[in-house]
Image: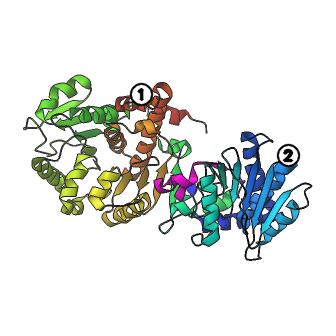
Amino acid sequence: MKIFNSATLRELDKATCRAQEISSVELMERAASAVSYEIISRFLPGKRIVVIAGPGNNGGDALAVARMLLEQGYRKVEVFLFNVSGKLSHDCEEERKRLITVDGVDFTEITREFTPPYLGKDDVVIDGLFGSGLNQPMQGGFISVARMINESGAFVISIDIPSGLFGEWNDDVLRRNVVHANLTLAFQTPRLSFFLEDNQICTGEWKLLDLDLDEEAMRKAPADFMLVDTRNVRPLLRKRPLFSSKRDYGSVLLFAGSMGMTGAAVMASRSTLRCGAGLATVHSARCGMPIVQTAVPEVMFEPDRDERFISDMTLNHDHQAVVCGPGIGTSETTADALEGLLANVKCPLVLDADALNCISTRPHLLELLPPQTVMTPHAGEFDRLFGQHDTAENRLKKAIEVARQYNIVIVLKGHYTATVRPTGRVYFNSSGNPGMATAGAGDVLAGVIGAFMAQGYRPDLAATIGVYIHGLAGDLAAEELGEFGMMAGDISDRLGRAIRKVMTSKN
């Protein structure tokens, strides 16, 4: 699914009106109907609902929602329209005219002084103050309105986007000056800002409402950000021909594990085979041989000359992908071996965990990264590599910058893991759950991506597919075990089922 910016969404609205031969007010009515249906499905007619509308089209949406709720028998609807400039948008003015004709409407238009209504925890607030058309941070009295809403304890529903939040970047926005929604009802596609942790306090739960925007216009409209779901992944997965051998599905070499961290090698290598790689070999500290050979007998073991850690990352055989980092530690000897690997590896490469930590102590190694290398940092590892970042937004911007600079793929792990390609395009993942915040889940992901690389998938596609399958396996584990009871091995054990679910999906 494309994630359009606010300007493109406005153009799509216009294109829809032209293609379907409807007015902008008719499209607004369609949006308000979808919002009203959602509210009706959640709250009984006796609920007190306070509608806060601004002077633009977002306010027009809110006024139309108020009218529709009144028409459906909701009698405790109070409407406040802020018109301090004395100028409403055309569509907002039209919706105002329609609303004030409704019998018994409790409507207040604020042109100067505002006497705030009482709001309590049993009330519902419909936030239609400002939508994605906002072009500068809210000022003065509007900030006071936002804070009044936030401090009320009421259940807050924002139409389109919480007032004061921008659809894309929010560098200069103080979140305390933005409406904090419990539920954000967005139209057709999500906004980029929904995927950044900094904004979660503002967006709350978000849900998409279908406006039946023109499909042809959406197909042609450009977008640098995407949301990945089953419909995107299914066409990429290849069916296996009847006449196959293990060599057809590639060999993965994993530099993983050290004394005390051999489990990382177990989880990464098992996941590699669970995702279809034909062969997997673990190169690890000599002490890890009995553990790996016992836990994953299907995996070959290549012992390092050192008993405790990896001291040599020479490629002694042909492999279609290399995974390096899970549990290898950060000793100087291991960092030296990694430097040798980066200088000589020719096949696709995944760098995870301690490989990233080693590079962070030797920044010149970034210049040795082979093109299309996949790096899989969490926020802490990313900051150790590329400098401290105070916000998720700035971290994502930096990831886009360095992916271009070094011609690499960055998998920035989080709730909506972002796969950042060298082209600057970003693919947010829709699968996964908080139960996956557990030791070893990253090792599993590294093995998954390596498996798809070995099978001939382009590194950027392998990362995008791998992140989604990994998250879906986590969802399957959570369904059975609950989020609190999940371990990394539970994710690995369900990778095959996750792939089957995607390939057999009819959505």
Where are the magenta residues, as a range?
193-214
Q: Amino acid at mark 1?
A: Gly
Which residue shows up at 87% across the image and 65% down it? 97
Relative to 275, is 502 on the left or the right? Answer: right
Residue type at numbered disc 2: Gln
Q: Which residue: 21% across, 30% down?
A: 300
Q: Quadrant of residue 363?
A: bottom left
Q: Nearer the viewer, residue 54 or 113?
A: 113
User: Mark 2 Cα within 10 Å, few/some/many (few <14, many 20+)?
Assistant: few
Q: Quadrant of the C terminus?
A: top right
Which residue has dot 1 on it?
A: 485
Pick the front one: 115 or 453: 115
- Residue 361 drawn at (x, y percent): 18, 57
Q: Residues within 10 Å of mark 1 (few under 14, many from 20)?
A: few
The numbered mark, 1 or 2, whose residue comes first in the sequence reads 2
Instruction: Residue 72: give its label.
Output: 2
Question: x and y percent of residue 203 in the render?
Answer: 57, 53
Q: Secondary structure at mark 2?
A: loop
In the rendered image, the vertical position of residue 135 relative to residue 350, given as above or below: below
Q: Is residue 194 magenta?
A: yes
In percent of width and height, residue 414 lies at 42, 48
